Amino acid sequence: MFRLVGVVVLLLILLPVVPAHAHGAPTDPASRAYLCSPGRPTASSSPCRSAIAAGLPSKEWDNIRLADVAGRDAARVPDGKLCSAGIERYAGLDLPSEQWPATKLTGTAFTYRATIPHLGSFRFYATRPGYSPARPLRWADLEQFLSVPSPPLVNGAYEFQVRLPRDRVGRHLIYTVWQNTDTPDTYYSCTDVEIAPAAPATTRPQAATPAPSTPESTPEGTLNSTPESSTPRPVPVASATGEPPSATTRLGLSAGAAALGGLVVLGGFLLWRKRIL
């Protein structure tokens, strides 16, 4: 009995010195806080060093949270302090700088790692065209493009298939809001990304369609070079001179034909007479 009491007392003594475990943040593409955490190559970047020097608790990259927000994000998180959610120790994440490490997007899969899973919904925002990381981030700079209620936990993370607005190209920021339903907390994250231009749609070349042998219509003032029928027509024979025979020629031909006809009749009569005699 006394041994059990001793163990309980020892645990009560040690618990306050054990750091509280945090809850979650984007890891692919990674949030600013995650990229500034110990062991990340990007933690040595100029913005991360400045944020850590300003008091960033870099080991708690997944604990940027406010209680009792209840969807009133813009009322609780002021402009210029969106990345820190207005929490003083995370204020270094709000530093306007074009040197924040950015992830080049190569697909549509996003991962939000849950160090402690919670039930809740996710809202994703993208900065509008014209955004510059050299200016403080405002709510007016953001446009919501995705909302996911109660996603399943897969291998310790929440996974999403996203479709960014098509007009977003180049340097932008993804703002993620995770509103719990099993706790009063809401989590906030800033993720710098580089969005490549959308690939142009490719179409297969189509074979050329042969022109019809007979057009449906012939424009006025043009000639139709295609005959209406493939059956050859008789070609008229023209005279050698290209002119019709004269009247004299026609009279001579008629007289010759009459004389020839008379000789035939006379010959036939003489032959008949010879037979009857």
Image (tube, grey):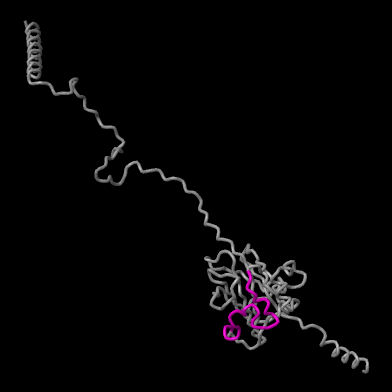
* On screen, residue 243 above or below 212: above
* On screen, residue 129 above or below 16: above
Q: Position of residue 226 (x, y in %)?
A: 31, 38
- Residue 85 covered by magenta stretch: yes
Depth check: 261 or 180 in front? 180
Depth check: 73 or 255 in front? 73
Q: Residue at x 91, y 92 (%)?
A: 6
- Residue 256 covered by magenta stretch: no
Image position of 64 (left or right of 196): right
Q: Residue at x 28, y 46 (%)?
A: 217
Query: How many numbered callouts?
Result: 0
Quarter holding residue 50: bottom right
Q: The N terminus lies in which quarter of the figure?
A: bottom right
Q: Position of residue 92 (x, y in %)?
A: 68, 77
Q: Which residues are magenta?
A: 73-97
Q: Residue at x 54, y 71 (%)?
A: 128
Q: Residue at x 60, y 83 (%)?
A: 77
* On screen, residue 11 above or below 24: below
Depth check: 198 or 114 in front? 198
Image position of 83 (left or right of 40): left
Quarter holding residue 28: bottom right
Depth check: 66 or 120 in front? 66
Image position of 229 (left or right of 54): left
Q: The C terminus lies in which quarter of the figure?
A: top left
Quarter holding residue 252: top left
Q: Position of residue 185 (x, y in %)?
A: 66, 85
